[in-house]
Amino acid sequence: MGYSLQTLWHEKARYSAGVGAVAFSAVLMALQFGLLLGLFTITSIPLDHTDPRIVWIGSKGVEAIDLGQPIPISYLGRVGEHSGVLPPEPYIANFANFQKPDGGTDLCFLLGHFGNAGIPDMLTSEQRTALTEPFAIVMDESDMKRMGMTAVNQTAKINGKEVRLVGSVKGLKSLAAPWVICSHYTASELMGALLPPDHTKYLLAKCDTPERAADLAAHLKAEYSDMAVYTSGEFSTSTRTYWLLRTKAGIAIGYAALLGLLVGGAVTVQTLYAATIASAKEYATLFALGIPRWRVYVTVLFQAFWIGIFGIALAYPVVQLLAAGARAAGTQVILRWEIMTGTALITMGMSVFAGLFALRSVRGIEPISLLR
Amino acid sequence: MAAADNLPSLRAVHLLKTFGDGASQRTALRKVSLNLFPGQLALLMGPSGSGKSTLLAILSGLLHPDGGQVLTRPNDQTSFVDIWGISEAARDDFRRKHTGFIFQGYNLFPALSASQQLEIVLKWGNNLSPGEARRQAEEMLDRLGLLNQRHKKPAAMSGGEKQRVAIGRALVKNPTFLFADEPTSALDWENGQAVIQLLRDAAHSRGATIFVVSHDARMLPFVDVCFHLDDGNLEEHEIPLVVAGE
Ligand SMILES: Nc1ncnc2c1ncn2[C@@H]1O[C@H](COP(=O)(O)OP(=O)(O)OP(=O)(O)O)[C@@H](O)[C@H]1O
Ligand SMILES: [Mg+2]
């Protein structure tokens, strides 16, 4: 409604408190969820560093890469022959017990690839060759200290068997247990009886295009209900979402965002309240002239709407700027469109709700108050 | 002169109003009756606290009386409607269609132009299209000598201009009744005189029934009839026959 916008513009100073509050809530929400998503990329690093054209087959209902149950190697036959799809390779992903050279123990996570499909992309070709040796492993630089490793060629024990570090990489950071890259053979030797004979954790079918990977995944999903099928991208999202929900970190951030919303909502209500009271005599004159109250209700709601629009418009560049700053400082911020749209919708809803709340101030305006 | 000889457009019959109860009870109106006629400018005077605003509020449908009737005959209809005998919604509708108000304050929206202050009444009250509302608003402003000021916002207007815009807002829907409570008290006499002259013209040329409450005896020469209220009792006064400006 034109009059609402005109009033907002004319009394910028008065309404800027509301606009600022909406922007504050929106920035807080978008940035926190962006940071959270960024933080949880760490859970899906092995997936994000393998070829995006891979179809992952795992045990029924598996939601995160570290939660797979053993599946029979015989599932290889289920993929069948398709043009543009390489024969699937087994892949082991499992927690294991790491015994440091100095004797202490810690948890690690084995990633055992069979052929080329499952090798993280940061490995050099020398490292790939070195890993073909039995009991050779590679880990991230940043995890070496924690695992008591000081140099390449050092030995340690995993599940009681000796392994040798043949190289280190960058960018394979871990949260709970350091990723340990090795061959499928090494992994299955280290697992021993923990993995039933002729079983593996995943089957990886590499396709020639992402589209074919999506097609194959869809086809296998429809065909077999006793196994889980994902493309690399899907499995990555599923893994992050699982840990996000599982750790309830989302709830913590959600509370913080809710708090931001409450503050934003309260200030917006206050702004609209004050604005309505400031115009009480004008509105009272209109009511004396018999103009129905809903006209003024609509005006206040439109003011709330515009406060929301301007607040969100203000928040957008601020979020981008702060995200850029955070990235420059080495933190991941992932502003997916779902976060941006969700934030916009929620803050918009909040300001309209604030408008509804502020309608109470209109109810108290009586034309008789103008007579003295 | 005004057509004071035909049927009244508004008849107040035995109006009673008391505020509070017990020891703090205060009687504002004691059986007040009066007749107002189409095309007539009526003035109500009286000391402070005598019940003038209370009477205006009851006559205009803003305040419920404790007793009595307010019979109105909008648009020269032949039968009277008791505005305190109908539903609140019907009374709001009556005011929307037939009643204009001018208050002591100008009560103009700071963000809106002179023209928009009038348009809002036509659009929101009479559901006119934006184009038609603007046309009628500008016609009204033209008559008030404010056409050149139509884009001005209240902050850029003088007190007299603001009060003329407020009069325009009250008159733009062409109401049968116009009620004004102390419309000139914030103005100097020059501007006040212009306001009373405008009200007089509106009564005489449009046939509106105009009821003005004022302390200011300098208005007397401009009005057609004068009532005097004292402690809730109403008397009609003779008006000196010399009419200023004629
Ligand atoms: N809402 C109210 N509650 C209690 N008493 C009221 C109320 N409104 C008016 N009164 C009392 O009724 C009496 C008449 O008031 P009213 O406002 O009609 O006077 P007035 O003639 O308009 O006075 P003034 O010239 O000062 O404007 C006064 O004594 C006033 O105190
Ligand atoms: Mg008064």
Image: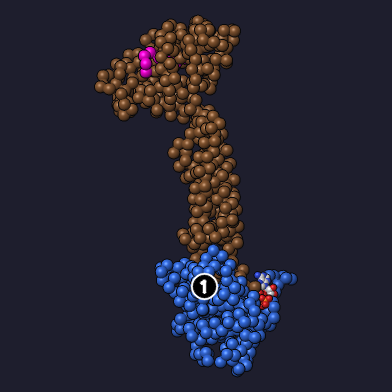
Task: Determine which residue is flagged by label 1.
Answer: B149
Asked if residue A141 is positioned above or below residue A368 in the image, the reply reads: above
Residue A44 makes an appearance in the image: yes
Quadrant of the image containing the C terminus of chain B: bottom right
Name the residue rendered at 57%, 15% in the picture.
A145
Q: Is A139 on the left-hand or right-hand side of B104?
A: left
Q: The blue chain is which one?
A: B
| Quarter occupied by residue A183 | top left
Asked if residue A187 is positioned above or below residue B219 in the image, the reply reads: above
| Viewer-proximal residue among B130 and B33 | B130
Amino acid marked by disc 1: Gln
Q: Is B102 on the left-hand or right-hand side of B138?
A: right
Image x and y of residue A311, in percent: 52, 48
| Viewer-proximal residue among B148 and B80 | B148
Asked if residue A318 is positioned above or below residue B182 in the image, the reply reads: above
Image x and y of residue A19, in percent: 55, 50
| Viewer-proximal residue among A298 and B97 | A298
Quarter of image, ligand 1? bottom right
Chain identifier of the residue bearing label 1 in the image: B
Judged from this view, the residue extending furthest toward the right is B23
Name the residue rendered at 47%, 45% in the picture.
A345
The region drawn magenta spans A110-117
Name the residue rendered at 59%, 91% in the picture.
B243
Image x and y of residue A272, in percent: 57, 55
Is-magenta flag for residue A149?
no
Q: The brown chain is which one?
A: A
Q: Residues within 10 Å of mark 1 (few under 14, many from 20)?
A: some
